[in-house]
Image (tube, helix red, strand yellow):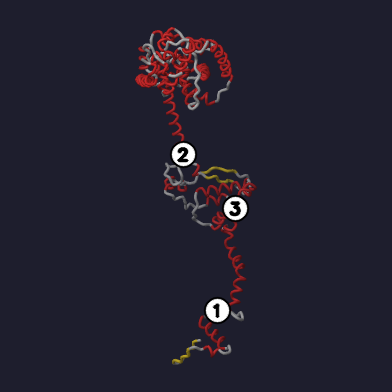
Amino acid sequence: MSDHQFNPPSRVTLEDLLHLKRAERPPPEFWAEFERELRKKQLAALVERKSWWHELAAAYSRFGRMRLPLGAIAVLALMFLSFRYYSPPRGEPQGIADGNSPANQAVVLTAAQPHDNARLVTVTPPAHERMPDAQAAAGSLHTTAPVAEVSQAAPGQVSMVIPWLGDVLENGAGTVELTPSARTIAVNLAAVAVIEPELVDAVARPRGFEERAMPAVRPRHTAEVLPTAAAVTEPRRARLLASLGSAGTYAPELSAPEHATRSVNRYLAQDGWDRSISRLEAEGDHLSIKF
Amino acid sequence: MDLTKVISKTLTTTPERQQEADADWVVVKKVQAGDVAAFDKLILKYRERVYSIIYNLCANREDAADLTQGTFIKAFQSINRFQGQSSFFTWLYRIAVNATLTHLRKNKLRTFFSFERITEEDKSSEILEALTDKTGADREVFVKELQEKLNEALQKLSINHRMVVTLFEIDGLSHNEIAEIMSCSVGTVRSRLHYAKQLLQADLQSYLR
């Protein structure tokens, strides 16, 4: 109702007013209903399956005051692992590599005869062929090591799998710019070619876009492109030559003065040429006419 | 628990509170050992106090009932994690307060008030006598209006200020207990209480002398 009717008769403090809030209590029947609902909820909570993250959070909270150091240790461990397995990109300096690291090893085919049962073995190249990491850091990824080892392994198979490498090997180049990775891949492919020829055929054969686009840029087929181009331009050339001479007797071997003399003679043979003379000069042993 | 906390707790906790905490700890150990029925004792002991604090914070009896039930269920589920570092009732209050805060923040825009009736006991009856000489239906109307005014003034306070006032003035907790429940210093509790009372006084001036 309206405040103007209110007229407090004696001293009432704020604490007294707030004490009235304490007197706001639910009736006794409320608690009966409350207990019934609580039982239902309690049972539902008992049968409810908790998610795994609840269990994880509960387990973590059990450590109490150890939570902070445990969290710090976990973060440090994560950092250590990330650094441990972090591989810097090419060109960045690394530590001195172990001689037995996979980068310095190659799988070489060992077989007494080409059709013997071949087996793959891992060999380590000589020390002078190993690529130190410092060298890699400087960006000098090329090596001048001979490829004798590759050719000893299986030159035929190598050239079968990688044609351009086969050229290199067959030409007997003493020094080639070949990275260790390329040599390793070539040797491995050669080994696989002996063991699983169908697999190599399936892998090495260009497909899709490669099949459509790559034949034109293969080194072996570059020489065949020129005759094809010449054949295409032949009719155009013939048409051009025909338009140059009235009788089609164009002789490209003629020199410039000879060509001029022939033109003048052809002109003088025509009727009425004398009517088109604009200037005639005789000087010494020669005559100059301007039409 | 930190040594300073233990000392401060020992110095500030009254013997009655300490006895109560010890008795609760015995019951809690029974529940932790698998005696689920023992938890009913704790429910019976604290349900009105927990309901009261939640009701005074959210001013809605239905929400208060739900939140009180939720508080006891959460306490039951987490009782194995209770290590006795604080008294059980402080721990239970903290659960209740956190649940209420979450509820209030979630339903900031939805404010429906529903009140319990004021039970006229000795003290409240005296206060009401001092406030009005009306009787019968007029008195009923006056009490209802007073309830609304009180609630309005409390709802104008921020959640933290309202909580301090509720815990101290309505539930009768000490500054230390409130500081422990709200995870803040005793000085903060005092300062908040002082500020909240100033605001309430200004708002309820027409009822005060």
Q: Distance between the residues labelled 3 and 2?
A: 34 Å
- Residue that badge 1 annotates: A253
For label 3, count other residues whose C-alpha is less than 10 Å away and answer few (under 14), some (14-19) or many (20+): few
Residue A97 can be seen, yes or no: yes
Residue A99 is left or right of residue A219, and the answer is left
Q: Of the two numbered discs 1 and 3 on the same chain, state the one appearing first in sequence.
A: 3
| Residue name at image x 55 percent, y 25 percent | A51
The disc placed on residue B199 is none
Q: What element carries label 3?
A: helix
Q: Give the distance between the C-alpha atoms of the residues marked 1 and 3, in whole angstroms.
A: 46 Å
Query: Quadrant location of residue B2?
Result: top left
Q: Mark 3 lies on which chain?
A: A
To the question of a shared chain for discs 1 and 3, the answer is yes
From the image, tell me which residue sits under label 2.
A86
Residue found at the very far top of the displayed protein:
B122
- Alpha-carbon distance for marks 1 and 2? 71 Å
Query: In this orientation, does residue B74 appear?
Result: no
- Identity of the amino acid at label 3? Glu
